[in-house]
Amino acid sequence: MDRYWLTIDLGTTSVKLIVWDEVGRKIYQDSFPVKLSYPEEGWVEFDPEEMRRDLVKGIEAIPYPVAGMGITNQRETTVLWDKSGQLLYPAIVWQDRRTADWCVENREKENWLNDKTGLPLDPYFSLSKVMWILDRVGNEKKINFGTLDTYIIWKLTEGQSFVTDHTNASRTLFYNIHSLAWDGEIISEFGLKRVNFPEIRPSFSEFGECQVDDQKIPIYVILGDQQASFLGQGCFQKGDTKNTYGTGCFLMANAGKVYPKRNRGLIVTVASLEEDQPIYALEGSAFNAGVLMDWLVKLGLVSHPGETEHYAREAVPTRDLLIMPAFTGLGAPYWDPYARGAILGLTPQIGRNEIVRAALEAVAFESGELIHNMDVIVESMKEIVVDGGMTKNELLMQMQADISGKNIKVFPETEATSLGVFYLIGNRMGLLGRSFIENKKRESKEYNPKTTQMERDLLWKKWIRGIERVRGWAKSENQL
């Protein structure tokens, strides 16, 4: 009898459920939206309990017997709850910028934290979110902390499993990336001994059983979403690099088994564990990609993101027009939570088509800068394998090749994040080898640079001028 495997992708704007058969065919798919809330400028949150309820309904509706499941999620998003399951506050999303001032106030601890965790002190990560919630809730009882995977699994197992994996733990600013454990000194320094931290296990483990209706489904995999995509696109060798175009853009390169000492403002993270030894990755995060396309829809310039390529191809060439997509600040390499978006170089000749094209260029510029910084550190980075919905836009992919000077290979599976979860299950169950992924990579569509180095240098100078103008824009007068 065939066995079927469920992967759940707890994304920022939607949750995707995919059922795979043993040879890697998708036989069932479902999804539902995440209802994000923006209570104040720069705040992003949602109700994880509502997500849990919708997820259970989705699992119940699957018309196949599921032998096991795996979960991937949006990593830094933070949840606190008590032992009864009562939430202290809604989930604060990775994009949220409300803790920028707290990070500035604690800037003297940044180098200390970076040495331990591989991360900068930024609102992106979980630490400042936990401090913000506790400062306002004032709950003195023991409470549970988790990224989204921890909370959802705690709920699905009816409180029996309080767990996470190394890929998610390494995104919190509580995890020592050298000892591969929660760092007691960090926890003590910020007065968090009353917080319960989940048990950290390898990404493929026995994480408990999901109780749905009359069936119990074993949970075998937890992965951070970008690490799942990294695995799904076959970044098995040092120098292998992928970029995911989703809500944001996330560039990740295999840095091997030795902790990289130089990072040029990039994140050092745990990509995976092999025989209990970490595989490190360098990662660069650009916070706004799909968000920028949704903004074009909101303005009424396009009716849906799929129209952007058509209008952009109709644009009149412009030399000075530049969109800076820093809606929620700048990620790597600047880590500036006070940066804000801008449109520069407007003239009366600028219309819808030109703005749409500039928005696509902005996405390519963001990733291009990450590629440039990573290229200095990672050897043998000749091509970038890419995935995500925006890779269907052929004009954007050519722009990315032209701006970065790298070959861009569009991975044929658009759901590479879910594929990474399934591959880890299948590989550890003895069902799949690396050839399963390598064969898919050979089907990638390739875009090669058509620009000269001089042309790329001119584009680069324009982008840097734009960065200089938007950095620190949202700082208050007293901070200036």
Image: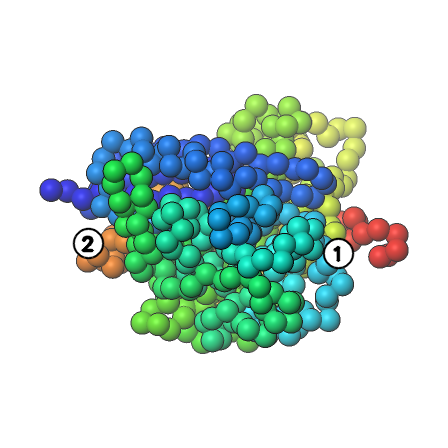
Residue type indicated by callout 2: Leu
Q: Is residue 119 visible?
A: no
Q: Quadrant of the C terminus?
A: bottom right
Measuring 51% from the left and 42% from the top, which residue is drawn there? Answer: 48
Where disc 1 sits, the SS reads helix
In this view, the residue in front, 120 or 440, is 120
**Which is nearer the N-term, disc 2 or disc 1?**
1
Where disc 2 sits, the SS reads loop
- x, y (%) of residue 342? 74, 41
In this view, the residue in front, 294 or 149, is 149
* Separation (CA) of disc 2 from disc 1: 49 Å
Measuring 70% from the left and 27% from the top, which residue is drawn there? Answer: 351
Measuring 35% from the left and 72% from the top, which residue is drawn there? Answer: 276
Q: With 20 as the anchor, is 366 left or right in this view?
A: right
Label number found at residue 101: 1
Q: Which residue lies under the disc numbered 2?
A: 431
Residue type indicated by callout 1: Asp
Measuring 23% from the left and 35% from the top, which residue is drawn there? Answer: 64
The answer to whether the residue labelled 2 contacts the one labelled 1, judged by CB atoms less than 8 Å apart, is no
Q: Residues within 10 Å of mark 2 (few under 14, many from 20)?
A: some
Task: Looking at this view, name the residue that lies furthest to the left.
Answer: 1
- x, y (%) of residue 343? 74, 39
Q: With 232 as the anchor, is 265 left or right in this view?
A: right
Q: Is residue 475 above or below residue 212?
A: below
